[in-house]
Image (cartoon, rainbow, N blue to C red):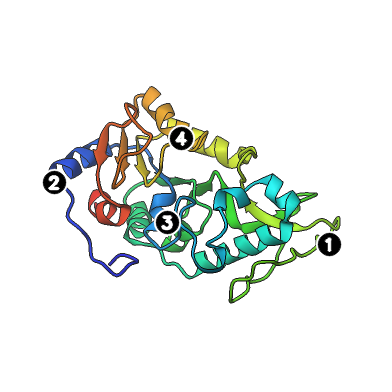
Amino acid sequence: MTADGSGPHPVADQDLTEARLALTGDGPLVVLSGAGMSAESGVPTFRDAQTGLWERYDPSALATPEAWARDRDTVWAWYRWRERLVSGAEPNAGHVAVARAQAHRDVVVVTQNVDDLHERAGSSRVHHVHGSLFAHRCDTCDAPMEVGPPPAEPVDSLTPPSCDRCGGRARPGVVWFGEMLPGRPWDAAVDAVTSAAAVLVVGTSGLVHPAASLPGLAADARIPVVEVNPGPSGLGSEVSVHVRATAGQALPQLLAP
């Protein structure tokens, strides 16, 4: 059962056969997941229209250091609302299939998503190259901060708590547009991709760099790359096999023992 209540959907047998063959190997399977995978659990992407209180805001305009400097309370309120939204979402059949694959294979997840759906599904090795909604830190000294649960209802302005160490303010632990990726998760992602037996790309646009370069690194190393996406993406010749389906539709069949 998928997060939206629908059952699994059939995927073309030939696509599945080719994809399963490409994903075989004795080494690690690396799963690269993007916003489309979380969208299947009801988490809106930045390209989706916002609803309710936030429908007049452009998410990409809020996710910048400039927005934080200009209107910190609004940005903090929006991210706390996203935390509440993610906390109410459930891992879908794709997340569960990836986690279950650990029982018979070495699986490493590299995700562009800032939610915790992979972890809640049971995946134990997850690298967040764009950070995490739940890893709050001081905007001045970078010290980790505990901020408590988000408000039960959305608000359009909320003052971030102060840092006990330096007096700065708590900020979301995500990578904003224009910021550098955190070095340790990125290095781990590159190492995982270039030493994999196969790479499975799920629900990514293939347009957000530098994460979009990871499938190409695998292809350059002659590592097979399988893409699962219901529509076209920015990926091209680096992909060995395309499966036109969502994560929840394809992964339970693709990753079954």
* Front residue (pair 238, 192): 238
Amino acid under disc 2: Asp
- How would you rate the neighbour count of disc 1 (Cα within 10 Å): few for under 14, some for 14-19, many for 20 or more? few
Q: Which mark is residue 164?
A: 1
- Locate residue 187: give its quadrant: top right
Query: Most extreme residue toward the front, as rendered?
Result: 56
- How would you rate the neighbour count of disc 4 (Cα within 10 Å): few for under 14, some for 14-19, many for 20 or more? some
Which SS class for mark 2? helix
Q: Quadrant of the N terminus?
A: bottom left
Which SS class for mark 3? helix
Earlier sequence position, callout 3 versus callout 2: 2
Earlier sequence position, callout 1 versus callout 2: 2
Which SS class for mark 1? loop
Earlier sequence position, callout 3 versus callout 4: 3
Amino acid under disc 1: Asp
**CB under 8 Å between discs 1 and 2:** no
Q: Position of residue 128 (x, y in %)?
A: 53, 47
Q: What residue is disc 3 on?
A: 38
Q: Position of residue 57 (x, y in %)?
A: 57, 57
- Locate residue 21: give its quadrant: top left
* Front residue (pair 214, 61): 61
Mark 4 to mark 1: distance in Å? 38 Å
Q: Which mark is residue 13?
A: 2
- How would you rate the neighbour count of disc 3 (Cα within 10 Å): few for under 14, some for 14-19, many for 20 or more? many
Q: Which mark is residue 212?
A: 4
